[in-house]
Image (cartoon, rainbow, N blue to C red):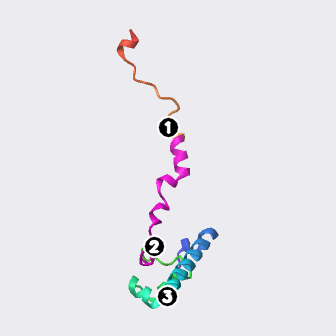
Amino acid sequence: MKSKCLQTLPDEVQKMLKATGKNIKVARARRKMPRRELAMRAQISEPTLKTLEDGSPKVSIGIFLKVLFILDLHKDFEKLASPERDKEGTYRETMRMPKRVHGKKRLEDMI
């Protein structure tokens, strides 16, 4: 049974997967690394690597990252969802903050 999630991927996500798969294929070719060698080093089958290079969403993120690691292209991955880049989250957090901050009332001030 096919996953409904995979059938309803936004076009932008599909384009990103295809572009990244193509980039991985180019990186492998630049290194003159046969598909068989990269698949062996990643401990995956050649058809799985081809599926990844074709931009399929069926390949797990773990395999995806392992291939990027082998090609030394993984270093910026953790920045993708970093709090510093989350403009929407920062905006929402700011909107929840109190508008004014009052100091604590002291008994001396009340007398």
Name the main secondary structure of what is drawn in magenta. Answer: helix
**First of labels 1, 2 by sequence position:** 2
**Quarter of the C terminus within the rendering:** top left
Residue 105 part of the magenta-drawn span? no
Helix, strand, or loop for circle 3?
loop
Where residue 110 sits, quadrant-wise, is: top left
The front one of 68 and 102 is 68
Where's residue 106, x and y in %? 37, 17
Q: Amino acid at mark 1?
A: Met
Q: CA distance from mark 1 to mark 3?
A: 54 Å
Residue 104 visible to the viewer: yes
Q: Which amino acid, mark 2?
A: Ile
Residue extending farthest to the top is 111
The Cα–Cα distance between marks 2 and 3, rounded to whole angstroms, is 24 Å
The numbered mark at residue 97 is: 1
Magenta residues span 65-94
Q: Is residue 20 left or right of residue 77?
A: right
Residue at mark 3: 32
